[in-house]
């Protein structure tokens, strides 16, 4: 389904609905740690490549470790939360959770592990995963 | 606490008293609130929000925070697999303390917004010396 930004006012709503429709997808089902693990992932296609986006608010990029091997990506790290409140402060609400996480996913496409780019900004980690050259569809000329 | 395995916190959709005119969905940011002697600290998770897209208002003893994501970054991206939805964030709190509106401090780092709401002088606890 192509994103057609016909009406800028409805664009976000349409995009949200498109994201909702894929919530039940089994695209990553066969991976070592599939659905339900932290951090939650969204996978997009951008041109030939795949973009993996996750929300990691409060996690510094030095506390994140990203590894790639074959077609498997591993995202591990530590999220600190609640640390600043000990001492004299009285706590009203504690909704943010901290802890460690380690998640591995296997993408169902051939990836170029050396070409992966990671970007972490404003609590969003984006991994640009290039599709391996040999996995790209080839146009076959009819002779 | 830091060695505990982290679980996904499902995003909660905002149920507002007044509906938005735009149909887009809003989410309630996970928030920690704590109080020190002279201030109320509000720590909110707003991943994907730039500092220029955050509105903080204190009116009629209500703190209202609205944080909008930059949706343009998703242009040209076709979703293949999703585990969470994206959307703007909004949350309102009733304040039980008098807050000095002139000195509200806000910092944003790694998608976490920290608000420092200074209490007005008479709301601060006064230590009474016993003669």
Image (tube, rainbow, N blue to C red):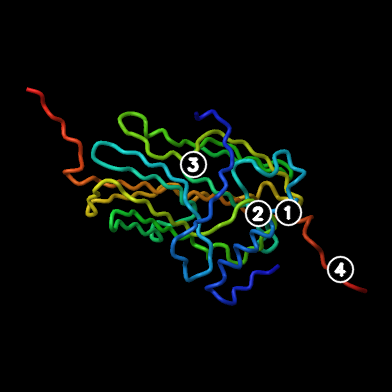
Name which quarter of the figure residue A39 lies in.
top right
* Disc number lying in front (3 or 4): 3
Q: Position of residue B77 (x, y in %)?
A: 63, 63
Q: Tell me whether marks 2 and 4 sit on the same chain.
A: no
Q: Residues within 10 Å of mark 3 (few under 14, many from 20)?
A: many
Q: Provide the secondary structure element on which disc 1 rests.
A: loop
| Residue appearing at x 54%, y 28% in the figure | B3
Residue at the disc numbered 1 = A25
Q: What is the distance, in whole Å, between disc 4 and disc 1 at their CAs?
A: 31 Å
SS category of the residue bearing label 2: strand
Relative horizontal placement of residue B7, taking residue A143 as reference (left or right): left
Q: Which mark is residue B117?
A: none
Name the residue carrying label 3: A59
Viewer-nearest residue: A53 or A134: A53
Q: Earlier in the sequence, mark 1 or mark 3?
A: 1
Whether label 2 touches label 1, CB < 8 Å? yes
Q: Which residue is mark 2?
A: B82
Mark 2 → mark 1, Cα distance in angstroms: 8 Å
Say which chain tag 2 marks. Answer: B
Q: Which mark is residue A140?
A: 4
Quadrant into which the C terminus of chain A falls? bottom right
Distance between the alpha carbons at the discs numbered 1 and 3: 28 Å
Instruction: Calculate the distance from the C-alpha at mark 2 to the C-alpha at mark 3.
Output: 21 Å
The mark nearer the N terminus, 3 or 4, is 3
Mark 4 touches mark 1? (CB < 8 Å): no
Q: Secondary structure at mark 3?
A: loop
Comparing labels 2 and 4, the label whose residue is closer to the camera: 2
Q: Is residue B110 left or right of residue B115?
A: right
């Amino acid at each position: 389904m192509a994103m057609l930004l016909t009406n800028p006012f409805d664009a976000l709503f349409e995009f949200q609905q498109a994201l909702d429709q894929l919530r039940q997808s089994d695209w990553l089902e066969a991976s070592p740690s599939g659905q339900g693990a932290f951090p939650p992932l969204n996978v997009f296609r951008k041109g030939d490549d795949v973009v993996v986006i996750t929300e990691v608010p409060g996690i510094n990029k030095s506390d994140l470790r990203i590894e790639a091997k074959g077609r498997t990506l591993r995202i591990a790290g530590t999220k600190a939360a609640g640390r600043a409140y000990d001492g004299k402060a009285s706590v009203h609400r504690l909704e943010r959770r901290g802890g460690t996480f380690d998640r591995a996913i296997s993408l169902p496409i051939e990836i170029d592990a050396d070409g992966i780019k990671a970007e972490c900004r404003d609590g969003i980690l984006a991994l640009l995963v290039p599709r391996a050259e040999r996995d790209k569809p080839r146009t076959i000329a009819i002779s | 606490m830091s060695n505990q395995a982290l679980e996904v916190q499902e995003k909660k959709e905002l149920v507002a008293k007044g509906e938005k005119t735009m149909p887009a969905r809003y989410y309630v940011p996970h928030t920690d609130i704590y109080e020190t002697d002279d201030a109320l600290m509000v720590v909110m998770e707003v991943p994907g929000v730039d500092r220029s897209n955050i509105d903080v208002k204190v009116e009629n003893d209500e703190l209202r925070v609205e944080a909008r994501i930059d949706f343009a970054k998703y242009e040209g991206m076709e979703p293949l697999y999703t585990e969470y939805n994206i959307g703007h964030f909004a949350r309102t709190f009733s304040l039980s303390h008098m807050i000095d509106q002139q000195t509200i401090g806000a910092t944003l780092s790694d998608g976490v917004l920290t608000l420092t709401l200074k209490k007005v002088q008479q709301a601060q606890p006064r230590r009474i010396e016993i003669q």
